[in-house]
Structures are given as C-alpha cells and as structure tokens.
Image: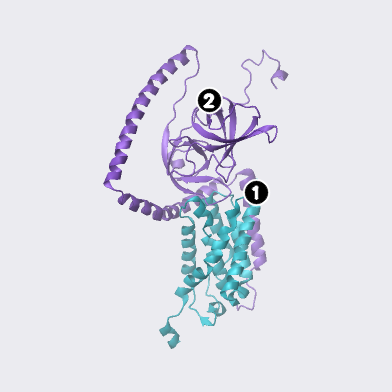
Chain colours: A purple, B cyan
Amino acid sequence: MQASAPPMFKRGPSLLVRLAFFALMSLVLLVADARFRYLENIRATLSIVLFPLQEAAAVPSTMLGRAGEFFVTHAALYRENEQLKRERLLNGAEAQRIRALEMDNEQLRKLVEAAPIPERQRMVAEMLYETRDPFTRKVVVDRGSVHGLGVGQAVVDHLGVVGQVTRVFPLVSEVSLLTDKTQSVPVQNARSGVRSVTFGLGLGGMLELKFMPVNADVRNGDLFVTSGIDGIYPPGLPVAVVTNIERNVSSFARILCVPAAGVSNYTRVAILSPGPPRPASPLVPASPSAQPREASR
Amino acid sequence: MSRSNLGDNILGGEILRPVRGVYITSTLALALLINLIPLPGWLASAMPDFVVVILIYWSVFQPHRIGLLPAWVLGLLMDVADASLFGQHALSYCIATCTAIFLHRRIQMFPMSYQIAHVLAILAGQQAVQLLIRLVASADGPDMLYFVSSLTGAAIWPAAAGLLTLPMRRRAKEEEVG
C-alpha cells in the first residue's frame, strides 16, 4: 500500500489479487484446521496475545457483579449463610456415610479381586465467556496447560456433567458443553440400568439418546448417569433427564433429554483429573496362542 | 502506511483532518475488545460484530490506509477467541473489507439510508460466507437469529460512522483560519 505515487497510477497488486491471496491463505488454514488439526500451536500463540484483551473485556461484567454484591443486604447474607450451614451439616453426614461405604466397597472389591476405583483430583475453574460462534456450544475457562490441564478431562458442576475440555491453551482452555454437536457421553439409566449414549443437539440445549430400541425401558423423568465405560467420565455422574419419548418415528425410539447440570448458567466449574490409562483397544485375548488368530478378528 | 491522498479526506463537501494510523489501529483494537465482552447467549447472538463494522468504515472512508492484512489478522484473532474454525472469520473479514474497498466511492456518495443498505448487504454477505464454511465443514445449521447480528450491525452504522468521523472534523475556528 504505497501511497506516495499519484492516485492515478496503480499501487501494488490489485485488490482482487490481494483478496485471492488472503482467501487462499484462509482456505489453507481452514483445511489444515478442519481436516488435520495442525494449527494448535499457532492458536495457542494467538490465545496468549488475546488473553490480556479478554481479561480487559471481562472487567465490565465483573464490575457489575461486584456492584451487585456490594448492595446485598445483611439479611440476605445472613439467610444464605444459615442455609449454607444447614447444607454443610447435611453434606457432612452424607460424606461420612460415603466414606464408610467407600471403605466397605474397597474391602468387597479386594475380596472379589476387582481393581480399586481410582480417585480423581478436582480443579476449580472460572468460566470466562461463552463463545460467540453460533455453530458450537463451547465456553472458555481460566485454566490452561500451565495449570496442568489436558485435553479430554471431564468438566462437572455440583449438579452433574457439564462437558469436556477439548482444546488447551497455555492460560485458558475451551470446554465443549454436552449440548455441542460433537459431544457424546456413554450413559446408563439410573433406574433400569439400560445403557445408551447421549448426543448433543447443538442449538436447543437438548440431548438425544440415539439408537435406542423402540421397546427400551426408558420413561419420562428418568435420570441418566455416566456409565464410565469410556474412561473419560467417572461412573455415576448425572448427565441428563428424559423429557420426551417418541416410540413410533422409525426403527429407533427418539428420546430427548435436558442436561442435569446447569449447562448454560454457571460461572464456576470443577475439572476432574484424567482417569487411569486405559488398556490398549481393541483388546487382544490374554493368551493369543490358546486361540487361533483368525477367531480374534 | 504513508500519508493518504487528499481525496480520501473529503466527506460530504467537508474537508477532514488527515487520519493518523494510530487512530485507525486503536479503533480496531477497541472493536476487538468490545467483541470479546462476555454476554449471555441471546444477547451475544444479537450483538453486531463490531470488528467488521469498523473495518467497513475504514475501508469506505480511508480505502488506501487499510488493507486486507489487518482484516485477516483480526479475523484470525476472532477465530481463536470464538473457537471457530481457523480462517473462518479471517476469510469472511477479508471478503467484507475487499467489497467495502471496491464499493467505497459509491458508498461515500450515497445518503445515509443507502449507506445502511450497502453495509447490511456486506455484513450479511460475510455472515453467509461463515455459514457456508460451517456447512461445508460440519453441516450444522444455525438458528433463525443468526442474521440478526447483521441487522444490528447495519443499525449502528450511522452512530459508528458519526463517532469515528468526529475526531477528524476540524473545529469551527480551524475552518475559519484555513
């Protein structure tokens, strides 16, 4: 863009040539990102550049929140404090019961020689913002690889599963919500034990249980919890509540549910540490010599 | 960036002060900052994309001062912030900027209502480009509110153009003297 020449002369390559150049660059990036996921390093670098801006942009909403907190009345605080104390008492009793059950369970598992259930560390992260992109359901949280976060870790709140960490930058990370189209979670009906997989439906904030037979034992109001067979989510976390069942649409029932966790209204979430390494899949038989090779394929 | 030629600094018969590069850069940075403000879902989808609006403004009124490179870089930054495909915003911003530069003489001449119509078309076009990229990449359509952002973007155009031109206006005294 040399402007020193008089305007009647062309300067540099023409507009269309420049557009073609940048469009080509963008297309290369798009293909590299969508097909091969090559560009995570560039993304991470740009995210560090963006981080101060994001922090600055979050100031107005934090200020508003602070101002709101300032005008909370003494009575409201007192009420909340009382309620929290009551809840803590109840939770404490529950925690003691769980500890006893855990010990019991551990001993029973030793008796039947089952592997112990590993404990998972929790890390509390603050949600920075929901992404503007209307095509995805993602939030950005303020913990990144410098805090020890890794791709694939499960994200929960006090009500159930929120989603999964899908991209980690040095200072922030992206969490794909359950309702994102790319997210699926293996679940189990807490009432009947029927196993299924939830798929995010994207925009409506709903989940769908796909490939369930028409006569599956599922009712409205059933709670689905994680089955834990994926090795990402620990078993037993609430995922979704069934709200709508249509049994005569196709050869499969169409079952819709809403997420159990407050997927779109929270500010703090807990990120679980990854579970133990999974055995390599597909599983090979323990003694390959005992079985003919072809049979295992 | 060097000094712009005089022709760019006339708006509706009024001669404006030359624009400093710092001013252009800082308005674009401010637009990016506003875009990053966290908002609840429905409000976020109705908010205009301030970066494109400001890019269009500079492309229309200072077409020789702004190129496609800033549009492309800002697009990449928005891609990272929005967790969208890398290059999605970059491509659409480039196309919007290019269209605005291409049409700048026409848009400058028009009265405000026609300007708004043009800006609306450019904004909707760049959203359509993003939509197309997403449909090709993952076949997941957005909801009905998707193009509302273009409407609000066009609606803030008069205010944005007025505000951005304000610091370039000569004061009455200055005009008397020179």
Q: Nearer the viewer, residue A117 or A198?
A: A198
Quarter location, residue B64: bottom right
Q: Quick one: SS at disc 1?
A: helix
Chain name for mark 2: A
Q: Which label number is shown at residue A191? A: 2
**Residue at x 36% of width, y 54% of height:** A63
Q: Position of residue B1 (x, y in %)?
A: 53, 70
Q: Nearer the viewer, residue A297 or B134?
A: B134
Residue mark closest to the camera, 2 vs 1: 2
Q: Position of residue B88 (x, y in %)?
A: 60, 53
Q: Residues within 10 Å of mark 2 (few under 14, many from 20)?
A: few
Q: Earlier in the sequence, mark 2 or mark 1?
A: 1
Chain name for mark 1: A
Left or right, residue A62 beside residue A287: left
Residue type of the residue flagged with mark 2:
Arg
Relative to A130, residue B173 above or below: below
Q: Do discs 2 and 1 share a chain?
A: yes
- Residue behind mark 1: A31
- The image shows a total of numbered marks equal to 2
Q: Position of residue B101 (x, y in %)?
A: 61, 69
Q: Is residue B62 visible?
A: no
Relative to A97, residue B2 above or below: below
Q: Quadrant of the N terminus of chain A?
A: bottom right
Q: Nearer the viewer, residue A191 or B18?
A: A191
Real-space Cα separation, disc 2 to disc 1, in angstroms = 45 Å
Q: Is residue B12 visible?
A: yes
Q: Nearer the viewer, residue A158 or A76?
A: A76
Residue type of the residue flagged with mark 1:
Val
Q: Position of residue A20 (x, y in %)?
A: 67, 61
